[in-house]
Image: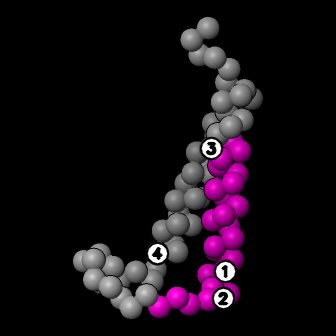
Amino acid sequence: MINFIDIALIITSIALVVSVILQNKGIGLGGLTGMDTGGVVTARRGIEKILFWITIGLSVLFFILVLAAVFVGGNPTA
């Protein structure tokens, strides 16, 4: 059981990292240098909205899997 949780954690963490990186497409060189880009807030539409909700779902799944790994894993010192 713990092997399944470990594999699911690895797959979920990779997918979570990819989804976060894909959301950073709007950051430019100005964001890296610390300059203010005007603070324009835009609404998420289309694929951006879907990617946003996928990222939230993956983070919740990752949190649940970590809790399951802790509870199933038991006490390693015993």
Q: Kindly state the secondary structure of the residue where label 1 is placed.
A: helix
Real-space CA distance between mark 4 and mark 2, rounded to the nearest whole angstrom: 15 Å
Numbered circle sitting on residue 45: 2
Residue at 63% in and 85% down: 44
Instruction: Name the colouring of the figure.
Output: one colour
Give the percent coordinates (x, y) of residue 60: 69, 54
Give the percent coordinates (x, y) of residue 45: 66, 88
Q: Is residue 41 above or below residue 69?
A: below
Q: Earlier in the sequence, mark 2 or mark 3?
A: 3
Numbered circle sitting on residue 24: 4
Q: State if disc 3 and disc 2 touch (CB < 8 Å).
A: no
Real-space CA distance between mark 2 and mark 1, rounded to the nearest whole angstrom: 5 Å
Q: Amino acid at mark 2?
A: Arg
Q: Kindly state the secondary structure of the residue where label 2 is placed.
A: loop
Q: Is residue 29 visible?
A: no
Q: Amino acid at mark 4?
A: Asn
Q: Earlier in the sequence, mark 4 or mark 1?
A: 4
Residue range of the region highlighted in magenta in the rendering = 40-65
Q: Nearer the viewer, residue 57 or 5?
A: 57
Which residue is labeled 1 in the image?
49
Q: Nearer the viewer, mark 2 or mark 3?
A: 2
Q: Kindly state the secondary structure of the residue where label 4 is placed.
A: helix
Q: Is residue 37 visible?
A: yes
Where residue 48 sits, quadrant-wise, is bottom right
Q: Amino acid at mark 1?
A: Lys
The quadrant of the rendering that contains the C terminus is top right
Q: Earlier in the sequence, mark 1 or mark 3?
A: 3
Real-space CA distance between mark 3 and mark 4, rounded to the nearest whole angstrom: 23 Å
Where residue 36 sits, quadrant-wise, is bottom left
Q: State if disc 1 and disc 2 touch (CB < 8 Å).
A: yes
Real-space CA distance between mark 1 and mark 3, rounded to the nearest whole angstrom: 24 Å
